[in-house]
Amino acid sequence: NGLYVRPITFAVLFSLVVSIPLIVMMFAFLVKVIFMTYAGNFPLIIPTSRYLVLVGVGMLAYAAVALLHVRRIKRVPLSLAMKVQE
């Protein structure tokens, strides 16, 4: 459990935090490209609460998957898990 779930949890949290600025930059670029032919200015304003919702939904989705994995891992006997399979 500690060998499998914990490192993946850190990787998922890291990717959530890193991906948010990348997603915002790509979305801002797409908005510019899409509205390039329109006259006027379309500012892209994303409230801070949306970032928190994005991280929260990502963490909840990962938690559901992680709980399923933990349930499955706990079913495997330790003696079987420690054997080297070739």
Image: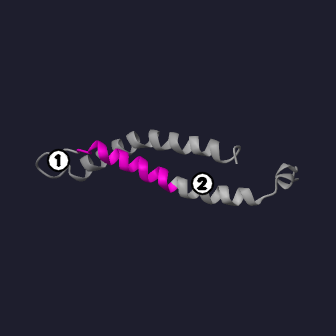
Distance of label 2 from label 1 (alpha carbons): 40 Å
- Check disc 1: other Cα within 10 Å, few if <14, some if 14-19, many if 20+: few
Q: Secondary structure at mark 2?
A: helix
Report the residue marked by disc 2. Answer: 66
In this rendering, is residue 80 above or below 47? below
Q: Residue 2 occupies which quadrant of the picture?
A: top right
Residue 51 percent across, percent down from the top left? 35, 45
Left or right: where 52 falls relative to 38: right
**Closer to us: 46 or 32:** 46
What range is drawn magenta here? 45-61
Left or right: where 85 falls relative to 52: right
Report the residue marked by disc 1. Answer: 42
**Closer to us: 1 or 39:** 1
Main SS of residues in magenta: helix
Residue occupying image coordinates x 43% and y 53%: 57
Residue occupying image coordinates x 24% and y 46%: 32
Residue 61 percent across, percent down from the top left? 50, 56
In this rendering, is residue 77 above or below 42? below
